[in-house]
Amino acid sequence: MKPDIKICGLKTEEAVEKAVARGASHVGFIFFPKSPRNIEPALAGEIAEIARGKAKIVAVTVDADTDDLDEIVDQLRPDMLQLHGSESPERMLMLKALYSLPMIKAFAVRDEDDLRRIDPYIGLADRFLFDAKPPKGSELPGGNGVSFDWCILRSLDDSIDYMLSGGLNRQNVGEALALTGARAIDISSGVESAPGVKDLALMDAFFDAVEAAVSKGE
């Protein structure tokens, strides 16, 4: 079965068009000033219209305050919010009540102990996202191009719906899907020619690799 595919950190019309044309299920826009993929809400709202009704539009934030989230939700009109910081279950519950939007909660993982941190969010998060812990010195919670031991995800209950992220690219996505059986994957730096610069040829190659992996597994 083909997994959901989220292309994250989009900043141009061309990249959104390519993602939609190749069948991305989700397109992500990052609102985090320290990220090379940061985008202003008004611009994100403009280019997201290309995907509206074709892919789910995801607003990715990192411990954003409510005023910033108000602007993001108003300008982008996302289908989902992705919380990629240290947001508490209480904060998530408040935001769900405030915006009535499905929520993806991201966690940085390195070992099985890290997976236990999701427990208080089960029933609150509509989907989890598992990313690799950032390398030492990085100020970015995601998009660092590093992966983790995917085998630890086998310890998860099958009822846990998650996106696999962190260091995915055209060379390793087949192995990642075979090892984890992930129903959804998320990629950002793996389809870039430079930080924050989506490469349309790399996007094509990634989608081709996913399709090849799915065909091999059928």
Image (cartoon, rainbow, N blue to C red):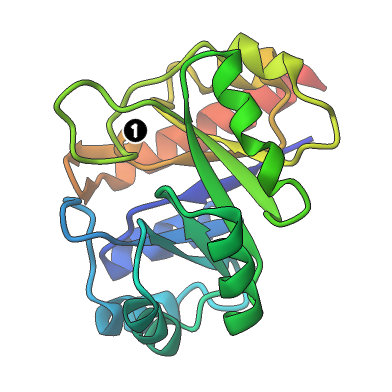
* Circle 1: residue type: Gly
Farthest residue in the front direction?
Answer: 90
x and y percent of residue 95 in the render?
56, 73
Up the image or down, 62 lies above or below 2; here it is: below
Quarter occupied by residue 162: top right
Q: Is residue 59 visible?
A: yes
Closest to the observer: 182 or 108?
Answer: 108
Up the image or down, 1 lies above or below 24; here it is: above
Q: Is residue 169 visible?
A: no
- For residue 41, side relative to residue 204 (left or right): left
Mark 1 highlights which residue? 190
- For residue 40, side relative to residue 176 (left or right): left
x and y percent of residue 27 in the render?
48, 60
Residue at image location 35% in from the left, 86% down from the top: 71
Query: Circle 1 sits in a helix, a strand or a loop, which is it?
Result: helix
Residue at image location 19% in from the left, 49% down from the top: 197
Look at the image and tell me in which quarter the N terminus lies. top right
x and y percent of residue 105 in the render?
56, 50
- For residue 40, side relative to residue 51 (left or right): left
Residue at image location 41% in from the left, 57% down from the top: 18
Crowding at label 1, few (<14), some or many (≥20) Cα neighbours within 10 Å?
A: many
